[in-house]
Amino acid sequence: MCSASASSTPTVTVSRDEVITGDAANNVTDNIYEKIGVNLHHIDSHPLGIIKSAIYSFFDRNYPDTFTKFDDLHPVVKATANFDEVLVPADHVSRSSNDTYYVDADTVLRCHTSAHQAETLRKGFASFLVTGDVYRRDSIDATHYPVFHQMEGVRVFTEEEWKAAGATDGTAYCEQELKKALEGLAKELFGDVEMRWIDAYFPFTEPSFELEIFFNGQWLEVLGCGVMEQQILDSNGREGHKAWAFGLGLERLAMVLFDIPDIRLFWTSDQRFLKQFKAGALDTKFKPYSKFPPCFKDVAFWVSEDFTENNLCELVRGIAGDLVEEVKLIDDFTHPKTGKTSNCFRIAYRSMERSLTDDEINSLQEEVRAQMASRLGVELR
Ligand code: DAH
């Protein structure tokens, strides 16, 4: 359980054995474990590092000496920090082991950087940016990967501060300051684009918003934000203060800004990708070095009672790694007499680096089929 006192060390070291073994609740796979500590956002010339630095420099220039930056807080956190302390309801789906990686029953791989809000407030920081890798069990396609990166921003105001600014209502003041800051940030990254604010819901903010920008002919959601729930401030040493908060996905921004077509590319060690980006350069447009054809394989089966798409995706990722581009449900029907449900998924295999041989794909697909039967308990058709 998290107590109300601040823990003294921001970074915890967790050995592989501690993460992988030991507890019945553990659902962290080797694939996922290998991503812990890679810290792509620490590399200045990596697209994720470039975006991080651009956001830092926006806040440094416009709010000098205001934000403390954290980019090495360990991704293994208490479930209480990830959920309870940011007021995620007890029955929220994100708490399920189908959606979140549990190290043990009380410990998770953070599923958002909001997991650090409460603790950072307790340590006495009023304005901060927290960047880190976050982990979610999810479906597979060009924009979803079980590990991605977020940046969280929080700015706390004392009553004296917002009154001195001439405001009569702290919440309205925060909303106005928040929108001003984030519109400025979006302009910094995307240039003079059209923007709009959409009302949203997050457990940790009220009111809550999403910012959308009009880019390359379509409206794109770029971040979530809002005025921090008073309870979070009151419970963490900031009684009666007001704050704004935001959370944004670095891959999302980088894919749009740099024309990166597939989220797996962030993890490649191929120099033909990495060499195209330069520290500090926001105007790079990625040029695909070659395009290899995808290969599609369908698998049809009678689902078992506890079958989920996320479990299937984890299994396929475990076998094919980054060679899997997409796993897509293409048929779903329930037999009228037996009541049994049949699903058909289409798996797209494609390497970002080379052509795959038929033999290689066939053996991956055979292994997928075998493990679906043995580990997911489905009946192949
Ligand atoms: N944690 C949210 C997510 O992962 C993003 C977010 C939204 C963070 C609103 C915030 C916020 O701090 O105020 O989807």
Image (spheres, grey):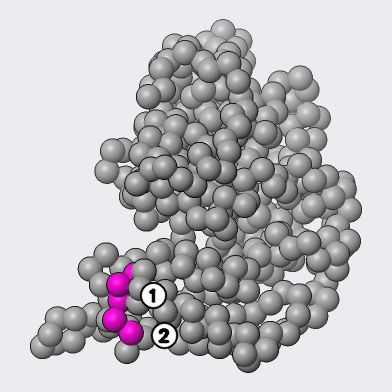
Mark 2, secondary structure of its residue? strand
Mark 1, secondary structure of its residue? helix
The residue at which mark 1 appears reads as 372
Q: Specify whether residue 209 is in view.
A: no
Depth check: give the residue in front, 315 or 300.
315
**Badge 1 vs badge 2, beta-carbon distance below 8 Å:** yes
Q: Amino acid at mark 1?
A: Met
Q: Position of residue 363 (x, y in %)?
A: 55, 84
| Label 2 near ligand 1 (CB < 8 Å) | no
36 over 349 or under it: above or below:
above
**Quarter of the image where the C terminus is located:** bottom left
The residue at which mark 2 appears reads as 299
User: Residue at left 55%, top 62%?
Assistant: 144
Q: Is residue 288 magenta?
A: no
Sequence-wise, the earlier of marks 1 and 2 is 2
- Residue furthest to the top in view is 160
Horizontal arrangement in the rendering, residue 352 relative to residue 144 (left or right): right
Depth check: give the residue in front, 177 or 237.
237
Depth check: give the residue in front, 249 or 263.
263
Q: Nearer the viewer, mark 1 or mark 2?
A: 1
Q: Position of residue 339 (x, y in %)?
A: 14, 81
- Residue furthest to the bottom in view is 358
Depth check: give the residue in front, 5 or 201.
5
Q: Amino acid at mark 2?
A: Val
Q: Which residues are magenta?
A: 376-380
- Helix, strand or loop: magenta stretch: loop
235 over 97 or under it: above or below:
above
